[in-house]
Image (cartoon, coloured by chain):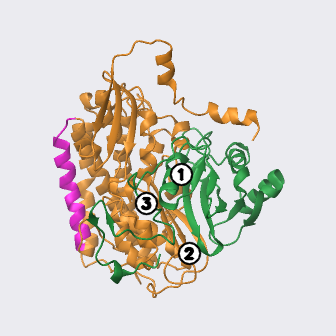
Amino acid sequence: MNKAMGETILESQPDLLIDIDRREQGDLDTEEMLVNMGPQHPSTHGVLRIVLRTDGEMIQEAIPHIGYLHRCAEKIGENLQPYQFIPYTDRMDYLAGMNNNQAYAVAVEKLAGMEVPPRGQAIRVIMAELNRIASHLVSLGCYGMDMGAFTPFLYCFREREMILDLFEAACGARLTYSYLTIGGVFQDLPEGWVEQCREFLDYFEPKIDDYNNLLSFNHIFIKRTGRIGTISPEDVVRWGLTGPLIRASGIRWDLRKVTPYDGYEQYDFEIPIGEPAGSDGFPAAGIEVGDSWNRYFVRVLEMEQSVRIIRQALDRLPEGDFRAKKVTNVKLPDDEVYVEIENPRGQLGFYVRGDGSAIPYRVKSRGPSFCNLSITTHVCRNCLLADIPAIIGSIDVVMGEVDR
Amino acid sequence: MVPEEICLILEKQFGDAVQSTKVEGGHPHAVVAADRWPEVALFLRDDPRLRFNLLNCISSLDLLADNKLACVYDLSSLPLDRGTALIIETHLFAVRVVTDRDEPTIPSVARVWPTAEWHEREAYDLMGIRFENHPDLRRILCPDDWVGHPLRKDYEFPLEYHGIPATTEYELTNPRH
């Protein structure tokens, strides 16, 4: 590589030695302190440990340490048939089990050339979007609690409980569903489920205004999260951040629109993005594109769109088979696929390679939380210690998926 | 842009560095020589026709039969000049870099795509591939004193770790690696 080329690479990099340079120039700092945040800290949302190098209240460097939940799920996937590995996928991102099942199922179906019947696809879309709402509700509630607002947490969990009841009616489980499986869904919807789901949507839609009144447009909340941890669109792409993070930074990008799967192209819905202060439906001041508040608010707007999608899917739920005929002992060809779907947290990808037998040769999962968390060091530089929960909470990581 | 065109552009630009291409099947990709990989990566990112600015994933791969290790880099292009308009078109491509199994080294691309930093640490941790010029190459998921690289096909499962016994069902489950 020639020298000029090497220089261009270095220029686009954050300056990792900036603190050391300051010190050599004789800058008077107060004494540095290492603070160990986590692994058992309420606002790290799981077992995430962040080592903070602080100068007074300012963060010089935040280094995340992960791996406390590592189970080497990929190795397990290389020893099991795809339908047997499905239950392991919802232990990765345990707040969005349906979406994780869907990602692996879509990847294996593409590899094996399997067709999912229309009814199976429609049920998958309904479940995936319900799970998106449930996951975002946990995110909103916990984020409010991190910021000192306890009440919205209870409201969010009240509504989430109803979604879990719907899931329980459909598949018997409340958290780790294994319901969306290879070739479709595991069993058909029970009688009366569609009506129950419609009732829930009618009840839930006005509640979104409640969350906005309680939390989103609360002056203290905006003060606490607005213009904190701002990530530019260029940084978002360079660090591979996806999902609500990329949209909060003003890029209208969603895999459900870009590379539709499971029939998402049939549905009519919008992709909300982060907006500057003063836009229609946004606070008049105190926020900017790509800050923690916008990352929070994109999730609220996404819940409205999910309700729209579920309504359309319920209206045109086709009759017929809900699962392909042969889903066990399917020979995987000697080929490979890489498939990504839109998880509540971002793009969840599965790389699956077959070798002619029914057990995949290699399974690799790309967790959105893993990539989203990798920007921590970059975005937490020179911010206040008290802003760390605001930033980490708005990234919304699930450690089960970071560590896999 | 279809994979055939991308392969043609790469072959025209780099000649022998592109060892082979595969455009049919579920995963179109080009195989790139390890020593030229950072150069190719920079071209993939910055060429106005390609603009692969998003590195989705690095999947490490153990090709035990050929005595090789490999990394698969999945890329997508995300146009940033559209303002707030909805982006519906993209092009996807993948690059595979193969390295020797006994001395596995691949040049790091963490300076081209910063997201590669953690992906490469993961590939180092679980597959044992060393990335040259990586800013901070240490284990990420396993503990620092872990022995071996679990995703290798000839990995020996440890029977204990710091006095903690491993699964007693080891003999029964008999992982086939």
Q: Residue at x 46, y 49 (%)?
A: A371
User: Mark on residue A351?
Assistant: none
Asked if marks 3 and 1 touch (Cβ < 8 Å), the reply is no
Amino acid marked by disc 1: Glu
For the question of whether residue A52 can be seen, the reply is: yes
Q: Nearer the viewer, mark 3 or mark 1?
A: 3
Amino acid marked by disc 3: Val
Residue A139 shown left or right of residue A294 in the figure? left
In depth, the one of A49 and A284 nearer the eye is A49
State the image coordinates of residue A366 (x, y, percent, origin top left): 48, 58
How far apart are labels 2 and 1 at the CA level? 25 Å
Helix, strand or loop: magenta stretch = helix
Q: Quadrant of residue A392?
A: top left
Q: Where is mark 2, residue-wise?
A: A111
Q: Nearer the viewer, mark 2 or mark 1?
A: 1
For the question of whether residue A275 can be seen, the reply is: no
In depth, the one of A128 and B114 nearer the eye is B114
Do the residues indicated by labels 3 and 2 lie within the same chain of the protein?
no
Q: Where is mark 1, residue-wise?
A: B120
Span shown in magenta: A148-169
The crowding category of the residue bearing disc 3, from other C-alpha atoms within 10 Å (few below 14, some 14 to 19, many at least 20), is few
State the image coordinates of residue A397 (x, y, percent, origin top left): 35, 49
Q: Chain of mark 2?
A: A
Q: Where is mark 3, residue-wise?
A: B147
